[in-house]
Image: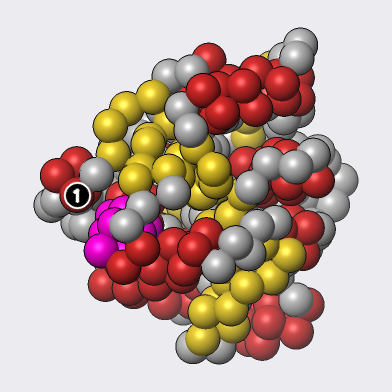
Amino acid sequence: MRVGVLTGGGDCPGLNAVIRAVVRKGVAEYGMEFLGFCDGWRGPLEDDVTELGIAQVRGILPRGGTILGSSRTNPFAVEDGVEKIKHNLASHGCEALVAIGGEDTLGVATQLADLGVNVVGVPKTIDNDLSGTDFTFGFDTAVNIAMEAIDRLHTTAESHHRVLVVEVMGRHAGWIALHCGLAGGANIILIPERPFDLEKVCAQVESRFATRYSPIIVVAEGAVPKEGTLSLVEGEPDAFGHVRLGGIGEALAKAIEDRTGKEARAVTLGHVQRGGTPTAFDRWLATRFGLHAAQAVHEQAFGSMVALRGTEIVRVPLSEGTGELKTVRPELYEEAEVLFG
C-alpha cells in the first residue's frame, strides 16, 4: 500500500515525530510505501510531492517544525479542488492519506472522507483546543517556553517596579495562558473565555504594588475586555476565514499605564512558542499518535482520528475531533482566581 502524508496549518513542535513514527511503523510492520505532500493541502492540490522513507525520517525526532512544510491552503476554496486532489492521489497510486493538522486541516479531511477519500487524521494544535483529544502535541512545549519567559520576567519587573504584560497564543481558548500563568506564578491571567474587567485588572495591579511586588499579567491573544473587541494586527482573513490576532498585550499595557500611572511594558512571545525542539511529553505523544495512525491505515479505519484519552490512544470519528472547540471550563479558571492580585 502506498500512503500519502501531509502536515497542515500552523507548525508546532512534534510534527516531525509523528511523520517519523508513521513511516517507521508503516514500513517495518506493514510493508507500506510513503509519499510526502508538501505544504499541507497545497501538496495534493498542486501535485507537489517529495520522497518519504526511512532515510528521510532518520534524525528528525528532536527537530521542530515539519520537514514536509505547511500552509493554510483550503482546497474547498479552489475551483475543482477536490477533484484535483483525488486525481493526484490516484496518479501516484496513493490508497490512503494521513493528514496531520488542527481544526481547519482536519475539517478538510472530514469533508474529503465523506467524499470517498481514505483519510486518517492526527490532531495537531498548539492551542490544545480540539475537542476529540485530551491533549495535542506542541501544547506542552509552548507552555514550557512561556513559563520560562515568565520566570525571567519576574526579576526585571521587580528591578524596575513595572507591570509586565505577557501575550501568549490562544485565539479562542486560553489553555496556554492558564497553564503557563499558573506554572510561572503570574498575578493575573486573562483568557478569551472570560471577557475581563479593565477596572478590576487595574485594581489588582495596584494591590500587587501595595505589597511592594511588581505584577506579571499573562494574556491570551484572543482575550478581550468586556467593553471592547478583538485587537487585530491586520484584518485580512486567511483561506479558512481566520483573521490574524495580536496587539492585546500592547493595548492592555497602555491602558494600565494610563489608568494607574505605573510603568507597563508588553512582551509578545508570538512564534517563539512554536519554534525549537519539542519537550519529552510532546515527543512521546506525537510518536504514539504516529504509530497508531499507521495501524489505523493498515486496518482501513478511514474517516477516523487518533486521540489521547487518559493515557490511552483511541480512535474517534474525524467529525468528533473537529465538531467543537475545547475551551477552558469556568471552574478551572475560577480555581486560579484566588492567586490573582
Name the one closer to the observer, 262 or 284: 284
Q: Residue at x 75, y 14 (%)?
A: 80
Q: Amino acid at mark 1?
A: Ile
Q: Position of residue 135 (x, y in %)?
A: 54, 71
**Which element is circle 1 on?**
helix
Question: Within the magenta stretch, is there residue 24?
Answer: yes
156 to the left or right of 123: left
Q: Residue at x 49, y 63 (%)?
A: 298
Q: Write down the residue under mark 1.
A: 54
User: Which residues lie in the magenta part?
Assistant: 20-28
Q: Main secondary structure of the magenta part?
A: helix
Image-quadrant location for residue 290? bottom left
Height in image: 9 above or below 18? above
Q: Are there few (<14), some (14-19), or many (20+) residues within 10 Å of tag 1?
A: some
Q: Residue at x 63, y 34 (%)?
A: 245
Q: Position of residue 283 (x, y in %)?
A: 30, 66
Question: Within the magenta stretch, is there residue 70?
Answer: no
Whether residue 115 can be seen here: yes
Name the one closer to the observer, 132 or 199: 132
Name the one closer to the observer, 167 or 238: 238
Q: Looking at the image, what colour scheme do you see?
A: secondary structure
Whether residue 145 can be seen here: no
12 to the left or right of 88: left
